[in-house]
Image (spheres, helix red, strand yellow):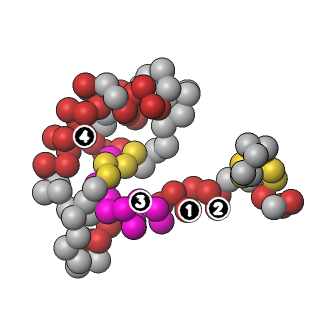
Amino acid sequence: MTRKEFYRTKAWQDCRNRYFEMVGGLCETCRAKGKIVKGEIVHHKIELTPDNIDNPDITLNWDNLQCLCRECHAEVHELYERKRRYKIDELGRVISRENA
């Protein structure tokens, strides 16, 4: 199963909706800073990969979820990108970060 397929499953949609309600629909990162901001995305802390996409301990475990606003979600993914040793250019080629 791909991530795209997973995010369309009823199991994920139900899990996401219940988690969102449980945290009150607020961005958890902003709330920790004392700000009240509407959450928009339920994010997986451990990134979903082909190796773990079928593992409900990763995909559906509330300990691996975080409700984020768009700004905080973008910041999290920027950190992921900086940690990678490669990037994909506009033509779809894999380029080492050292050569980018």
Q: Secondary structure at mark 1?
A: helix
Q: Residue at x 46, y 44 (%)?
A: 46
Q: Is residue 37 above or below residue 13?
A: below
Give the CA distance from mark 2 to mark 3: 15 Å
List the residue tagged with mark 3: 73
List the residue tagged with mark 4: 16
User: Disc 3 or 1, which lies upstream in sequence?
Assistant: 3
List the residue tagged with mark 2: 82
* Residue 61 covered by magenta stretch: no
Q: Residue lying farthest bottom?
A: 34
List the residue tagged with mark 1: 79
Q: Is residue 53 above or below residue 82?
A: above
Crowdedness near tag 4: few (<14), some (14–19) or many (≥20) residues, C-alpha within 10 Å: many
Give the CA distance from mark 4 to mark 2: 27 Å
- Verify CB contact (< 8 Å) between mark 4 and mark 2: no
Region rendered in magenta: 65-75
Q: Residue at x 55, y 28 (%)?
A: 50
Please say whether residue 71 is visible from this viewpoint.
Answer: yes
- Verify CB contact (< 8 Å) between mark 2 and mark 3: no
Crowdedness near tag 2: few (<14), some (14–19) or many (≥20) residues, C-alpha within 10 Å: few
Give the CA distance from mark 3 to mark 1: 10 Å
User: Disc 4 or 2, which lies upstream in sequence?
Assistant: 4
Please state the horizontal and vertical placement of residue 80, each as a whole percent of the image: 57, 56
Q: Secondary structure at mark 4?
A: helix
Q: Is residue 13 above or below residue 73?
A: above
The amino acid type, in three-letter code, at marker 3 is His
The amino acid type, in three-letter code, at marker 4 is Arg
In this view, the mark in front (3 or 1): 3
